[in-house]
Amino acid sequence: MPNPFVHLELATDDVAKAKAFYGGLFGWKLTDTPMDYTLFDTGTPPGGGIFKRPPEVPACWSVYVGVPDIAATLKKARRLGAQVVRDRTLISPEHGHFAVLQDPGGAVLCLHEAPTGHRPARKPRKARKAPAARKPARRVRRRR
């Protein structure tokens, strides 16, 4: 899939209640961060976060689609009838950028652009076995 879902978020009025509910319901691993943001790990990608919603955002779930270039994606989305709710915004140098759009039917979707130089995690390569030590070649005497 060229543009996978990469992150999920819950904006809520009561983070503690949401953590207790989703942790208890699904057994998600929850990790608080210094940014007043709780990461959750579902066991398979994508993971996500829970945070206290700002006044302008309703309590809701948001999904993020990974794109290589938010500006180009928003330009294309506008041509296709979308409205930009939030233009390209820096999350942090380590986490990249996000934007929010509303599709022509009214549904809201978030975009995520990974930081420059970021490459998706790859499966580690299997270690190669070191070649076995070779025994010195035996000299074979030729018969005359």
Image: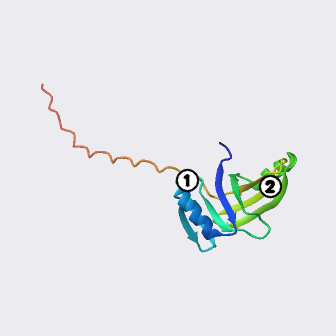
Q: Which residue occupies 47% across, 51% down?
A: 124
Query: Is 114 situated above or below 130?
Result: below
What amino acid type is highlighted by mark number 2? Answer: Leu
Observer-nearest of 131 and 63: 63
* Residue at (73% x, 55% y) in the render: 111
Determine the image quadrant of residue 95.
bottom right
The residue that mark 1 highlights is 121
Residue 37 sits in which quadrant?
bottom right
Of residues 88 and 59, the one nearer the viewer is 59
Q: Quarter of the image containing the N terminus?
A: top right
Give the residue furthest to the left. 144
| Residue 24 on image: x %, y % | 53, 61
* Badge number at residue 101: 2
Residue extending farthest to the bottom is 34
Residue in view at x 64 percent, y 56 percent:
7
Give the left or right position of residue 75, taking residue 14 as reference. Answer: right
Left or right: 143 in relation to 113: left
